[in-house]
Image (cartoon, grey):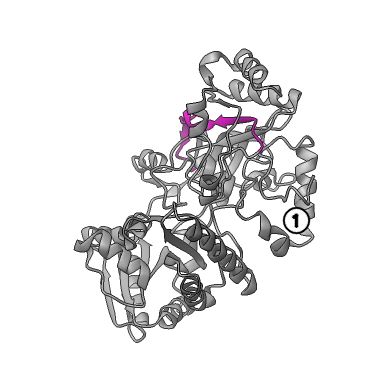
């Protein structure tokens, strides 16, 4: 469809003020956090910024009538080119549909629009001593709609699970413009076995089956307190063994985070006052709950890991716990500091492997970086086997960009070889399309059949998850 005709049609459908089409505006929508989107310039033809459900319905109906691609977009913190438009068409920017519509504290649920920022939601819930448990590192930026679209997890997934575990219902606009509600239209129940679970179908669908316009989420009482065990290890293998020993003792921490030697170095360069000890690995074990149970579990973890670690520190003092967590929270920003003048890029950044094989994976990732002469900073959610690797390169150096591609490819194949997955929480998008057949086999064909049934024109976020050469 010609761009001028498309823009005029959208303006008539939703109003001039909600449509962007200037080149400078389109450039802003041509990327997310991924290296993939930085290597291309995938401009949409127009952007719609809806303020209401009716706006979304009108935009999708227009697109369906004319066979125009639609790409839903939240805060663009994604790292897989999932919210950019490789086939042009319309981006629907959901960031302005950002209202918390209703809190039903007695029934432990909240209804929100998808553009609500995660940290803002939990700040609101905290006033009622409630919590939405998923805890992504991009909490202060990412939208909850994006979290649901990618079924994100975060640091506390080891205890609290995925975003999808807290989605009770979704109101969404289907590819033909029809508005539906999953999880029963007027339900306030926190569980149901009524019919096929459409909510689970749409969670993690990355905008390929519809556009979310409202979310009904389960919340829980916030834990009274948290405590933290800091354990320093001279061998990666000992850090991994300590995790297994804690689980075998019947203790379920709320988080278990790992920083390898590269991540420790990055934090100390970025924030020297942290003064983390040089080691092969540092583990942070968090426990939460009432003060008595937190103290008991924390001290018990310290006892369990002490024979394997160089040093162990336990604290349930809020100021110290926050200071220790700050070291973990800094890693992402700190990664780019390990090479002067370079930058951290997102590629091969989200594999998940069996918990028992985390140390082996970390060593293999280190070897891959050395093989291709690329500096890698690695950290992650060791309690669920989710590893985040941060390549650090000069992005204007074409050879370094080429070698990063080789690194990412080897990391993805490593994950599959040892019984893992190419993405634990960031999604597939464009970047992981080449690995879908190897990971899923015939199940990928079933996914495509579902996509075809709900979106026969393939207008909903096309060019994601499914290879264009294999699925036409």
Q: Can residue 179 be seen in this view?
A: yes
Q: Give above or below for 246 relative to 92.
A: below
What residue sits 57% from the left and 40% below the top?
83
Residue 41: image quadrant is top right
**Quadrant of the image occupied by residue 129:** top left
Question: Is residue 283 in sight in this rendering?
Answer: no
The answer to whether 420 appears left or right of 249 in the picture is right
Q: Which residue matches tag 1? A: 444
Q: Which residue occupies 19% across, 62% down?
A: 273
Return the residue nearer the eye: 7 or 232. 7
Mark 1 residue crowding within 10 angstroms, few (<14) / some (14–19) / many (20+): some
> Where 369 falls versus 225 (above or below)?
below
**Secondary structure beneath label 1:** helix
Magenta-highlighted residues: 87-108
180 or 324: nearer the viewer: 324
Q: Would you say 464 lies left or right of 163 here?
A: right
Query: Where does residue 424 sit, x and y in percent of width and height?
Result: 56, 59
Pinpoint residue 366: horizontal percent, then vertical percent: 46, 73
């Amino acid at each position: 469809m010609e761009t001028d005709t498309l823009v005029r049609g959208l303006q008539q459908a939703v109003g001039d003020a909600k449509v962007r089409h200037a080149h400078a505006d389109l450039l802003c929508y041509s990327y997310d956090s991924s290296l993939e989107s930085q290597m291309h310039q995938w401009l949409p033809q127009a952007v719609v910024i809806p303020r209401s459900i009716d706006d979304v319905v009108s935009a999708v109906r227009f697109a369906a009538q004319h066979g125009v691609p639609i790409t839903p977009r939240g805060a663009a913190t994604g790292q897989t080119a999932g919210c950019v438009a490789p086939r042009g068409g319309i981006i629907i920017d959901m960031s302005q549909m950002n209202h918390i519509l209703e809190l039903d504290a007695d029934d432990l649920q909240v209804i929100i629009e998808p553009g609500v920022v995660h940290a803002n939601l939990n700040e609101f819930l905290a006033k009622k001593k409630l919590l939405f448990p998923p805890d992504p590192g991009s909490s202060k930026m990412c939208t909850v709609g994006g979290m649901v679209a990618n079924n994100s997890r975060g640091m506390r997934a080891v205890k609290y699970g995925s975003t999808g575990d807290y989605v009770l219902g979704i109101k969404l606009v289907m590819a033909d413009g029809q508005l539906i509600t999953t999880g029963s239209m007027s339900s306030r129940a926190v569980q149901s076995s009524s019919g096929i679970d459409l909510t689970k179908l749409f969670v993690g669908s990355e905008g390929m089956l519809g556009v979310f316009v409202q979310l009904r989420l389960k919340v829980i009482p916030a834990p009274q307190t948290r405590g933290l065990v800091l354990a320093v290890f001279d061998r990666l293998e000992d850090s991994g063994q300590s995790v297994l020993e804690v689980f075998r003792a019947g203790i379920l921490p709320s988080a278990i985070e790992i920083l390898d030697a590269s991540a420790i170095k990055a934090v100390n360069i970025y924030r020297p006052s942290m003064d983390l000890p040089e080691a092969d690995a540092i583990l942070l074990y968090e426990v939460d709950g009432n003060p008595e149970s937190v103290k008991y579990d924390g001290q018990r973890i310290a006892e369990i890991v002490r024979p394997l670690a160089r040093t162990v520190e336990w604290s349930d003092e809020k100021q110290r716990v926050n200071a220790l967590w700050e070291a973990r929270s800094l890693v992402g920003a700190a990664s780019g500091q390990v090479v002067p003048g370079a930058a951290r890029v997102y590629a091969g950044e989200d594999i998940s492997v069996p918990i028992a094989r985390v140390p082996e994976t970390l060593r293999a990732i280190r070897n891959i970086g050395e093989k291709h002469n690329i500096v890698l900073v690695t950290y992650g959610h060791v309690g669920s086997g989710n590893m985040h690797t941060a390549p650090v390169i000069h992005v204007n150096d074409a050879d370094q960009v080429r070698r990063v591609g080789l690194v990412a490819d080897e990391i993805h194949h490593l994950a599959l070889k040892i019984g893992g997955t190419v993405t634990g929480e960031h999604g597939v998008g464009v970047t992981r399309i080449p690995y879908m057949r190897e990971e899923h086999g015939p199940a990928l064909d079933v996914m495509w059949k579902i996509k075809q049934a709900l979106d026969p024109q393939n207008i909903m976020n096309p060019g994601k998850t499914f290879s264009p050469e294999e699925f036409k």
